[in-house]
Image: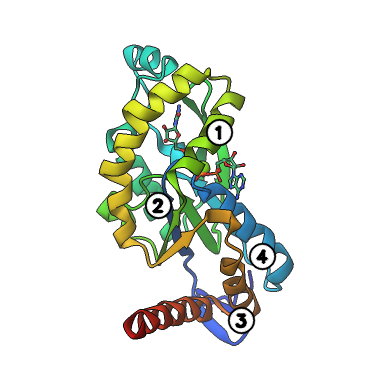
Amino acid sequence: RAETGNDQNTYGLMTRPNKPFMIGIGGGTASGKSSVCAKIIDQLRYLDSNGRQVVIISQDAFYRDLNEDEKKKAIKGEFNFDHPDAFDYKRMLQTMKDLAASKPIMIPKYNYISCTKEENGVFLEQPDVIFVEGILTFYFKEIRDLFHMKLFVDTDADTRLARRVNRDVLRGRDLEHILNQYTSLVKPAFEEFCLPTKKYADVIIPRGADNTGIYFCLYSFASSSISFFFFFLLSLLFFSSFLAFWL
Ligand code: ADP
Ligand code: C5P
Ligand code: MG
C-alpha cells in the first residue's frame, strides 16, 4: 500500500482515493463462494506486485446471537439459518460502512458447531480490496449498495447438496439432521431469498471455483489497476450482451 500522504494511493499508472474496493459474492449454500474468494486471493499472491491487502469477510460472521430455545432448535437442525432474520443486519451494515470509510475493525469468527461467534476474530486495518461472501450478501439493499462489484456463484443444486453433506458431516452433524434441514429450511429459503438476488449481480460465475475463466480477469486486475479490472469486466459483460444479440 503506497501512501502518497494526501489521502490518495498510487497504483502503477493510476491514482485512486484512499478507500477500499468492495466486492460482494452471493450464491447458494456450498456453491463455492468461499473457494472462489480463496482462489482469487491465492492467484493475487503471485500476480499482484503492488502489495495490495485483499481480505475475505464471510456474512456468517454476522449471524445474530440465539436465545436458549433457538439454540435447542439449532442443535436439531430446526433453526432457519437461511432466513434474513437469522442475521444481525444492523451490525453487518455498520461494519460494512466502517470498512468502506477505511476504519479499522474487528470481524467476529463464527463457530458452526456451537452456533455462536467469538468476538475476538480477525482485526482488519484498512484493507485495499474486500470480498464479502454469503448466501444473502445482496438481500439487504443498504448493504448491497455498498459494493462496487457484485458476483453471483451459480452452481447446480445437486452439486451444492452433495458438497454441503460432506462439509456438514465434517462439522459433526448426522445425515438425518443435514437432509432434514436442507429440505425443510435451506432449499425453500434459497428459492425465496437467495436466488432472487442473482439479478443484482454484475457478473455470474457458473461452476464456482472450477471456472478458470475468472482467473484470466485477474491478470488485468493485478498487472494494472483496480479501475482497469473493473473496465475489463464491464467489457466482458458488453461483449456477452453483444453475442446474445447476434445469436
Ligand atoms: P460456499 O462458501 O458457497 O458455501 P465453499 O467454497 O465453502 O462454498 O464450498 C463448499 C464445500 O464444497 C467445501 O467443502 C469445498 O471444499 C467444496 N468445494 C468447493 N468448490 C469445489 C470444487 N470445485 N470441487 C470440489 N469441491 C468443492
Ligand atoms: O458457507 P455457506 O454459504 O454454505 O454458509 C451458509 C449456510 O450455513 C446456510 O445455508 C446455513 O444453513 C448454514 N448454517 C448452518 N449452521 C449454522 C450456521 C449456518 O448450517 N450454525
Ligand atoms: Mg462459505
Taking the image as drawn, is residue 125 in sight?
no
- Which residue has dot 3 on it? 224
* Residue at x 45% of width, y 41% of height: 29
Figure quarter occupied by ligand 2: top left
Whether residue 163 sits left or right of residue 68 in the image: it is right
> Label 4: which residue?
44
Residue closest to the far front: 247
Task: For mark 1, give the secondary structure.
Answer: strand
Split into 4 quadrants, where in the image is the C terminus? Answer: bottom left
Quarter in which the N terminus is drawn = bottom right
Q: Nearer the viewer, mark 2 or mark 4?
A: 4
Image point (41%, 52%), residue name: 26
Please report whichever mark, 1 or 3, sits nearer to the chain's N-terminal start: 1
Q: Secondary structure at mark 2?
A: helix
Give the label, 4 or 1, closer to the camera: 4
Which one is closest to the eye, mark 2 or mark 3? 3
